[in-house]
Image (spheres, rainbow, N blue to C red):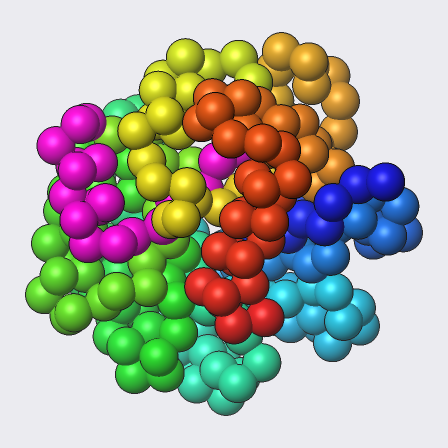
């Protein structure tokens, strides 16, 4: 029998319909209690809200994923309006952040407009007292930390975090959360991060349908993979497996108030 788990970051609406239905149908089998499906843009947010209404074990977050071309002012305004209208139905603002990978591919892309968009969502998270789910890695992470500090945001979740030791220390000091993906099974840097970060501020995710390697190569990303992640984290942290399960479950439930 599997211990209860929660996938704290998945793009459920991106899956093909058949895959999505399979995941929903198999949640009970693998004791996946809930999914937090994060949004990419307005269309994505609408789909996620619909899924959360159809399935009680799917929760939604509303935001704008930064790794895409800039939206128009009207598009952002519409997304803000949608968030305002449905803030009671969402569990968080997200996914939001800065376009690190986009700028790696094209360094001519200005960061300033993305900073403005991110700050607008930070303000929304503050306004509605909601957690914020962040895409902020490497050099972008300290920039985002400064923005969170500016607005006194405490409930910040850096998903699939990657960054330097100084930023990690800053995040730990601020009480920010990180989430660990199935690549903890085979990525040394993620394993070192797990050893360093307090388990009291750690949760687990798949970021599905993003694919993984190692034991998950050529397999559809499924929330059941979280069980393997927790087994690995338990070993890396030197704590017994049932205690690790209880801690991750408690962390996610309390952080997202679900």
244 inside magenta stretch: no
Q: In the image, is 141 to the left or to the right of 231?
A: left
Question: Residue 231's quadrant in the figure?
Answer: top right
Q: Which is more toward the observer, 183 or 69?
A: 183
Q: Which is more toward the observer, 193 or 234?
A: 234
Q: What residue is at 19 percent from the left and 54 percent from the top?
A: 174
172 inside magenta stretch: yes
Q: In the image, is 256 to the left or to the right of 51?
A: left
Q: What's drawn in magenta, residue-wise?
A: 164-181
Q: What is the count of numbered marks?
A: 0
Q: Position of residue 98 (x, y in %)?
A: 28, 46
Q: Position of residue 192 (x, y in %)?
A: 35, 20
Q: What residue is at 12 percent from the left and 32 percent from the top?
A: 166
Q: Position of residue 7 (x, y in %)?
A: 62, 49
Q: What residue is at 33 percent from the left and 73 percent from the top?
A: 125
Q: Relative to 167, does residue 215 appear above or below in the rendering?
A: above
Question: Residue 58's quadrant in the figure?
Answer: bottom right
Q: Relative to 185, does residue 226 appear above or below in the rendering?
A: below
Q: What residue is at 48 percent from the left and 82 percent from the top?
A: 87
Q: Which is more toward the observer, 178 or 64?
A: 178
Q: Relative to 214, does residue 32 appear above or below in the rendering?
A: below
- Residue 98 visible: yes
Q: Position of residue 94 (x, y in %)?
A: 43, 60
Tell me the quadrant of the picture where the C terminus can be found: bottom right
Q: Which is more toward the observer, 185 or 233?
A: 233
Q: Relative to 89, does residue 154 appear above or below in the rendering?
A: above
């Amino acid at each position: 029998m599997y211990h209860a788990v929660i996938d704290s970051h998945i793009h459920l609406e991106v899956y093909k319909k058949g895959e999505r239905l399979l995941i929903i149908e198999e949640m009970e089998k693998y004791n996946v209690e809930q999914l937090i499906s994060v949004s990419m843009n307005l269309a994505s947010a609408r789909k996620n809200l619909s899924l959360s209404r159809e399935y009680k074990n799917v929760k939604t977050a509303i935001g704008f994923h930064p790794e895409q071309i800039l939206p128009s002012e009207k598009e952002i305004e519409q997304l803000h309006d949608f968030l305002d209208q449905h803030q009671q139905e969402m569990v968080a603002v997200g996914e939001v952040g800065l376009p690190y990978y986009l700028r790696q591919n094209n360094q001519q892309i200005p960061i300033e407009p993305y900073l403005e968009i991110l700050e607008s969502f930070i303000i929304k998270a503050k306004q509605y007292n909601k957690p914020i789910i962040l895409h902020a890695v490497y050099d972008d992470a300290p920039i985002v930390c400064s923005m969170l500090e500016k607005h006194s945001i405490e409930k910040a979740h850096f998903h699939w975090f990657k960054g330097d030791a100084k930023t990690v220390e800053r995040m730990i000091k601020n009480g920010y959360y990180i989430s660990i993906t199935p690549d903890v099974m085979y990525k040394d840097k993620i394993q070192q991060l797990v050893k360093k970060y307090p388990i009291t501020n750690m949760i687990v995710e798949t970021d599905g349908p993003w694919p993984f390697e190692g034991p998950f190569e050529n397999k559809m990303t499924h929330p059941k993979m979280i069980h393997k992640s927790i087994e690995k984290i338990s070993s890396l942290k030197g704590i017994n497996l049932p205690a690790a399960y209880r801690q991750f479950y408690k962390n996610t439930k309390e952080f997202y108030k679900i």
